[in-house]
Image (cartoon, rainbow, N blue to C red):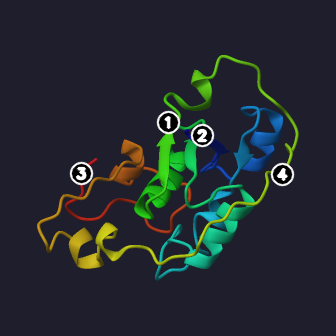
Amino acid sequence: DHPEAVIVDVRWYLDGRSGRVAYEAGHLAGSVFVDLDAVLAAPATPEAGRHPLPAPEVFAAGMRVAGISDDSVVVAYDDAGGMSAGRLVWMLRALGVDAALLDGGLAAWTGDLATGAGAPPAPGAFAARDWPGDRLATIDEAAGDAGAVVIDARAAERYRGDVEPVDPRAGHIPGAVN
């Protein structure tokens, strides 16, 4: 017996558009919206950056509201090549929850889309737990001191520092590859 997947819409936009508004304009029927800024990241600070990991309690509370439990199977999607949905997938997998990206994202869906806020799901049973240290890099590792390869998956123009729509500093971590 396989559990029914929880389908999660994780749209987020660099230009400040609302992912929730996009969700309400058209989403996979039965999916639930998870706000990247409110649930998948702590508030930005100069020290921690724009999207630091949220406190475990904040993440767990957001998962419960989304109907996600510790034993859920989650399929996440967005409309930006998996950029924001991939964050949720990684966070869940780091905590041992079965999660995957919808191949092709919203654009791959050929069926009808639902509109509106959607019915709230039954709350999940998701326990707060610390982010596993073995899944996180230290600043020394990211700076290349440990021989790690850092991959910057942002658009090439942001990597090069030609344009920076949201971060206070343009460019990339020295030694990172795009």
Q: Are marks 2 and 4 in contact (CB under 8 Å)?
A: no
Is residue 114 depicted above or below 78 in this figure? above
Q: Residues within 10 Å of mark 3 (few under 14, many from 20)?
A: few
Residue flagged by tag 4: what amino acid is it? Pro
Single out the mark in the foreground, 3 or 1. Answer: 1
Distance of label 2 from label 1 (alpha carbons): 7 Å
Type of amino acid under label 3: Val
Q: Which is nearer the N-term, disc 3 or disc 1? A: 1
What is the distance, in whole Å, between disc 1 and disc 4 at their CAs?
A: 26 Å
- The residue singled out by tag 4 in the image is 120
Q: Callout 1 environment at 10 Å: few (<14), some (14 to 19), or many (20+)?
A: some
Amino acid type of the residue tagged 1 in the rendering: Gly
The residue at the point 78 percent across, 32 percent down is 26
- Do the residues bearing badges 2 and 1 touch, measured as CB atoms within 8 Å? yes
Q: Quadrant of the N terminus?
A: top right
Give the numbered dot on residue 78: 2
Q: Secondary structure at mark 3?
A: loop
- Give residue 155's position: percent from left, percent from top: 41, 43
Give the residue furthest to the top: 110
User: In whole angstroms, how far apart are the C-alphas of marks 3 and 1?
Assistant: 19 Å
In the drawing, what numbered circle is on residue 81?
1
